[in-house]
Image (spheres, rainbow, N blue to C red):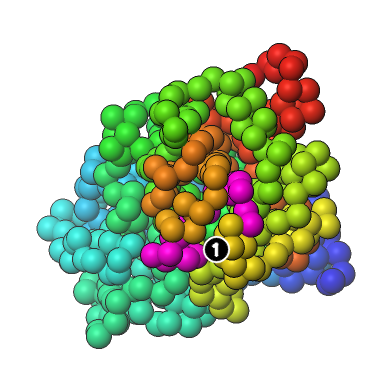
Amino acid sequence: MNKIVKYKLNGKDVEAPEGRLVIEAAKDQGIEIPHYCYHPALGNPGNCRMCIVEVAGAPKPQVSCRTGVREGLEVKTDSDAVKRAQASALELHLVNHPLDCPVCDQSGECGLQDYYMKIGQYSSSVREDKEHKGKRIEAGPHVMLDQERCVLCTRCTRFVDNVTKTHELGIFGMGHNERVEVTPGMTLDNAYSGNVVDICPVGALTDRDFRYKVRVWYLDKTDSICPGCSRGCNISVHANTQRPWHNDGKRVARLKPRVNMDINGHWICDDGRYGFSSLDSDRLGKVLRLSPERAELSWFDAAHEVAAKLKDSSIAVVASGMLSNEDWAAYKALFVDALKVQGHYFTAEPDQLGEEDALLRRKEKVPNLKGAEALGLKSGSFDELKKNLEAGKVKTLYVIERDLTKIWGDKAAGLLAKADMTILQGPNKYALGDSFTYRLPATAYVEEEGHFTNFEGKVQAYKKALAPIGHARPDWDIFALLKKAVIQPAAKVAA
Ligand code: SF4
Ligand code: SF4
């Protein structure tokens, strides 16, 4: 840690570690200095010239992203000279900028719009025609490039050069023709490509999945944890409930990273960012008995019917690392403490395994196997379960949030049919959803609050972003309801 020095910021005596960049030291004091190229995780090339400040004794304004704090430094971020310098830097950025705001996805969260309203508001002195560049360039499967809107800050090229080291974007051409381009022969398809949309301060790089779906000011934002793997990246769920007729009626419009330097830094992977379609499709909403007679049940009746059969059966439970810590605790109270079940199966199998890398992605594609481990729960092997099913040793198979066809392939339906009673609990129906005896709808993680424990043992909270679909309840609530029905079969359970 550098020694603390005293300096003056807009006339006020303040302190900062020696050498801390003025742009960062000012932010520590609650003062946001306009900038495009500086990014805390990507460095400070100093090319956008927006973060200009006045430094006492310097012959001309300085860029605050390349000026370090020192003892006795005197900095002004809001003087007339600073405002004039920032306004002319902004005017230069806008010389060839198109008037796309009404149709630009960045509108409402755009660095050009925001600074124009704050420090610009001039009539352009440029009378020449604007230079035109490429628009609607499919940079990769997730990202669209509009070269005209680019301010050449180089954040995106620094990301693919220094973070993913995949080099799919570069700055090409000179002068007015200078532009961001996809490197010839390449496609922006690395596992973290969506991050360039977040770091682009303007609408030059936009998200193909989100494009034209909903205006950003209609989005509700909720802090959450990505359930896509055991890293537990911090995310924000952006939900569109104010304009449900937009985005094909889908409630979740996009997921964005939240900064947590201990977990994910500034980034999330594309698997997590775009893997949310199951939140608004293939959902279970009704409490159903499917056989022998199909009927929609109340939670009370379902709990008592299922509980009565659970009590006198040899049970195997297939669970999932999608359960929260709260769910696992209620799971243990029902299946271990009340029902004394021996067969628990929740390891990550092919349905929940995928690629990993040194940046963020972990191979187990569920967020909370550690939560089960912390309670002392142990999983048997799926091979053992298969053998027990084939030998007719499992009378009741209780499946929580798993697609058995992705574990056992074509054999899954036959294995399921070996049990006398089968229960599917979870948010989604999956391939064999019509083949179970009962279906109990559970909330998705965006419809509840809870905690996940990541692979390093860090416990993190996620919040409720949306109302549950239909009659879905949190898993812990379903377990508690069943436990009550197991312990007090004659009692009326308030369902
Ligand atoms: S990048 Fe910003 S200023 Fe440019 S068109 Fe989009 S919203 Fe408007
Ligand atoms: S595309 Fe965006 S992030 Fe890349 S240089 Fe242009 S403005 Fe910066």
- Seen as rendered, the residue at the extreme left is 129
Residue 473 pos. (x, y %): 59, 31
Is residue 455 in the magenta section? no
Residue 106 spot, x, y in % from top left: 35, 48
Quarter holding residue 392: bottom right
Q: Residue at x 75, y 49 (%)?
A: 341
Q: In the picture, residue 478 is in which quadrant?
A: top right
For image coordinates 30% across by 56% down, the residue present is: 208
Label 1, on which residue?
390
Q: Secondary structure at mark 1?
A: helix
Residue at screen point 47% across, 43% down: 436
Q: Nearer the viewer, residue 351 or 79?
A: 351
Rendering coords of residue 281 (x, y %) = 37, 42
Q: Is residue 385 left or right of residue 184?
A: right
- Closest to the observer: 300 or 95? 300
From the viewer's side, name the closer residue of 446 and 351.
351
Quarter of the image with the N terminus is bottom right
Part of the protein shown in magenta: 393-412
